[in-house]
Image (spheres, helix red, strand yellow):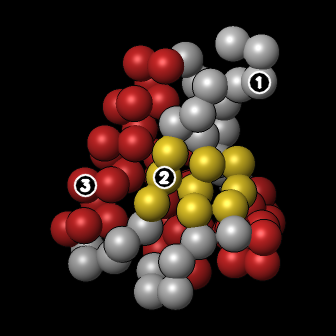
Amino acid sequence: MLLLNDDYTPMDFVVEVLSRHFRKTETEAQLIMLAVHHKGQGVAGVYTRDVAETKVAQVTAQARQAGHPLRLVAEPETGE
């Protein structure tokens, strides 16, 4: 699952999402958020298709409810 950079979603919201939905520690969440910010995307986690699609829906709903355009995509691993 990849989080994609945008110019509007606050960094602290991204860290919150990573902690809440992906069970990342504060340090892990900060590092992923910085990768998203500097490289355009960051890996939130690797999950089965069903779990990944559920997480996309949950995170997208939370982001929209908070007024943020945060994007998250579920992509198959290379070789699938």
Could you tell me residue 12's position as x and y percent? 54, 79
Q: Which residue is tagged 2?
A: 72
Q: What label sits on residue 78 in the rendered view?
A: 1
Amino acid under label 3? Ala
Label 3 neighbour load within 10 Å: few <14, some 14-19, many 20+: some
Q: Which residue is outermost to the left?
A: 65
Query: Helix or strand or loop: what does disc 2 sit on?
Result: strand
Which residue is at a point 78% across and 70% down the rendered structure image? 39
Instruction: Locate residue 55: give its quadrant.
Output: top left
Give the Cα distance between marks 3 and 2: 11 Å
Which residue is at a point 48% across and 30% down the rendered structure image? 52
Query: Helix or strand or loop: what does disc 3 sit on?
Result: helix
- Regarding residue 80, the answer to whether it shows in the image is yes
- Regarding residue 10, the answer to whether it shows in the image is no
| Of the image marks 3 and 2, the number of the one nearer the N terminus | 3
Give the Cα distance between marks 1 and 3: 28 Å
